[in-house]
Image (tube, rainbow, N blue to C red):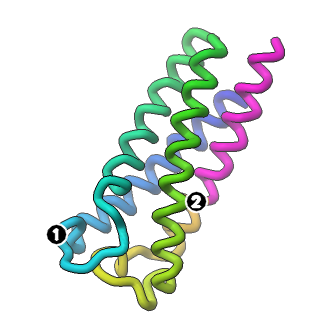
Amino acid sequence: MEFAALGAWVLATGAGAYLLIEWMADGGPSAKVTRFPALVVVGHPLAGTAGLVVWIAYLVTARAAYAWLAFAALLVVTLQGFMLFTRWLVGGGGRHARGAEQAFPAAAVAVHGTVAATTFVLVLLSALEVTRA
């Protein structure tokens, strides 16, 4: 399960990187009007990457503290991602979105969110399992 979580986390990171590149290519933070706070746009991938590094540290050491620390980072990432998603969704998923987020393909958003939710569940279950052991 731990390596399934790693795979899901890497896939979510890839889909998120694609969305970030799309956003930057279409004006990103320099767009006059955007629904996305710059701090969340920067914090979301940074916290996700930091959590992934901690998850890899857990896989190498099998220490429960790393699993829970990775989950805590993932919890922050999830809350930030939910904020970004709801702001994108309020904009109609591109139909009424303003600024650079208009270019987001709905399929990419769906893949990123679905894989991220899977990652969240797998990391939580893995952390619970290593705590019981």
**Above or below: residue 19 compared with residue 95:** above
What type of secondary structure mainly makes up the magenta span?
Answer: helix
Does label 2 or label 1 sit earlier along the sequence? Answer: 1
Residue furthest out toward the right: 132
Q: Label 1 near label 2: C-beta < 8 Å?
A: no
- Amino acid carrying mark 2 in the image: Gly
Residue 80 x/y as whole percent? 48, 53
Tell me the SS state at disc 1. Answer: helix
Q: Which residue is mark 2?
A: 113
| Residue sitting nearer the eye, 112 or 76 | 76
Q: Residue at x 38, y 59 (%)?
A: 18
Q: Which residues are magenta?
A: 114-133
Residue furthest out toward the bottom: 95
Q: Residue at x 79, y 23 (%)?
A: 129
| Disc 2: CA contacts within 10 A as few (<14), some (14-19) or many (>=20) | some
Residue 67's quadrant in the figure? top right
Quadrant showing the C terminus: top right
Magenta span has 127?
A: yes
Residue 14 x/y as whole percent? 44, 50
**Above or below: residue 100 compared with residue 39:** below
**Above or below: residue 130 compared with residue 21:** above
Q: Which residue is mark 1?
A: 30
Magenta span has 68?
A: no
